[in-house]
Image (cartoon, helix red, strand yellow):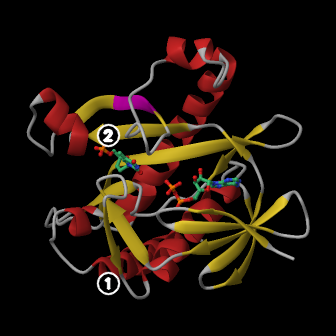
């Protein structure tokens, strides 16, 4: 019998009969302000999952290990169950969002090198910023593990920035999460969709990510569907 382990802001995680495998269900909902604002969007779960699947398959093809095992339906998949490392790894290529508001900057300026920021994953605490010495002192991860995860973030950025560019989009920033498997080794988990990255149209500068919901700019599901179609075409073109 399956058991619902966790119902989050975008997905449900179900324990399957195999203790090492979870069934993920992508939900038709979006949240902002750390869950304080929540709305239903028909088709959003399917569109977000379709994008994340394309990205994770692309990363796997380029040597990055992810939790993905297999697809079950347009909204469900099986993944390797991890002990999640409670950190959000944010990589920024362009000034936007909290980086702009925190430092009093206008959005849009390219950064001379990617900025790496780590946040402690806690809804109650509003995901506070955390640095490396706090992370190691609190035994959340060792320095070697942090170095390894940041190197993976850099690899993801190096692979996805040109891919999204081919798809006519600027990869402004993105958030990754990692987990440990039973033998302790670290893999990329969670998802990569416009829920946790910023994508701007290369020509118009239009937002093609969850900011359309946060800032009431456009329909969320059709925006994600557009990202999916463009990304699929760019990946096909590379083959
Ligand atoms: P949130 O927790 O931010 O509301 P979601 O609704 O996306 O986010 O919930 C998915 C949850 O499952 C997240 O807390 C994420 O850290 C966790 N998770 C993602 N991949 C795995 C995995 N492979 N094994 C265990 N937990 C995972
Ligand atoms: P920020 O500018 O709001 O800090 O967001 C930076 C990137 O991280 C952006 O692509 C959205 C993503 N992100 C998440 O996925 N989850 C979060 O809780 C936050 C704050 C940001």
In primary-sequence order, the first of circles 1 and 2 is: 2
In the drawing, what numbered circle is on residue 222? 1
In the drawing, what numbered circle is on residue 93? 2
Q: What stretch is highlighted in magenta?
A: 114-119
Residue 132 position, x and y percent, is 51, 17
Rendered view: 123 above or below 139: below
Q: Which residue is drawn at 52% across and 46% down?
A: 176
Residue 146 position, x and y percent, is 60, 24
The quarter of the picture where residue 179 lies is top right
Rendered view: 226 above or below 69: below
Residue 33 position, x and y percent, is 29, 53
Rendered view: 214 above or below 179: below
Is residue 201 in sight in this rendering? Answer: no
Q: Separation of disc 1 and disc 2 at Cα?
A: 25 Å
Residue 102 position, x and y percent, is 18, 31
Asked whether 116 falls inside the magenta stretch, the response is: yes
Rendered view: 27 above or below 74: above
Q: In this view, does 183 lie to the left or right of 98?
A: right
Query: Along the line of sight, which residue is nearer the eye, 171 or 133?
Result: 133
Between disc 1 and disc 2, the foreground one is 1
Residue sitting farthest toward the front? 124
Provide the secondary structure element on which disc 2 rests.
strand
Provide the secondary structure element on which disc 1 rests.
helix
Query: Along the line of sight, which residue is nearer the eye, 182 or 6?
Result: 6
Q: Does the residue labelled 2 lie within 8 Å of ligand 2?
A: no
Q: Residue at x 65, y 64 (%)?
A: 57
> Within the displayed image, which quadrant is ligand 1 positioned in?
bottom right
Is residue 76 in sight in this rendering? Answer: yes
Q: Residue at x 65, y 47 (%)?
A: 188
Asked whether 197 falls inside the magenta stretch, the response is: no
């Amino acid at each position: 019998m399956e058991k619902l382990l966790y119902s989050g802001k975008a997905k449900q995680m179900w324990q399957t009969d195999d203790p090492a495998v979870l069934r993920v269900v992508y939900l038709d909902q979006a949240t902002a302000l750390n869950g304080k604002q929540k709305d239903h969007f028909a088709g959003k779960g399917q569109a977000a999952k379709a994008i994340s699947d394309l990205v994770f398959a692309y990363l796997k093809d380029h040597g990055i290990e992810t939790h993905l095992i297999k697809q079950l339906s347009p909204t469900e998949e099986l993944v390797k169950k991890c002990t999640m490392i409670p950190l959000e790894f944010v990589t920024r290529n362009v000034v936007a969002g909290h980086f702009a508001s925190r430092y009093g900057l206008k959005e849009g300026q390219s950064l001379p090198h990617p900025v790496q920021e780590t946040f402690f994953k806690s809804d109650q605490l509003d995901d506070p910023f955390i640095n490396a010495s706090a992370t190691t002192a609190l035994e959340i991860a060792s320095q070697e593990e942090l170095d390894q995860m940041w190197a993976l973030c850099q690899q993801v950025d190096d692979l996805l920035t040109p891919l999204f560019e081919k798809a006519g989009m600027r990869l402004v920033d993105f958030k990754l999460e990692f987990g440990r498997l039973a033998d302790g080794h670290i893999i990329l988990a969670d998802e990569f969709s416009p829920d946790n990255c910023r994508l701007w149209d290369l020509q118009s500068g239009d937002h093609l990510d969850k900011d359309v919901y946060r800032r009431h700019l456009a329909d969320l599901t059709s925006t994600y569907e557009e990202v999916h179609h463009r990304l699929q075409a760019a990946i096909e073109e590379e083959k």
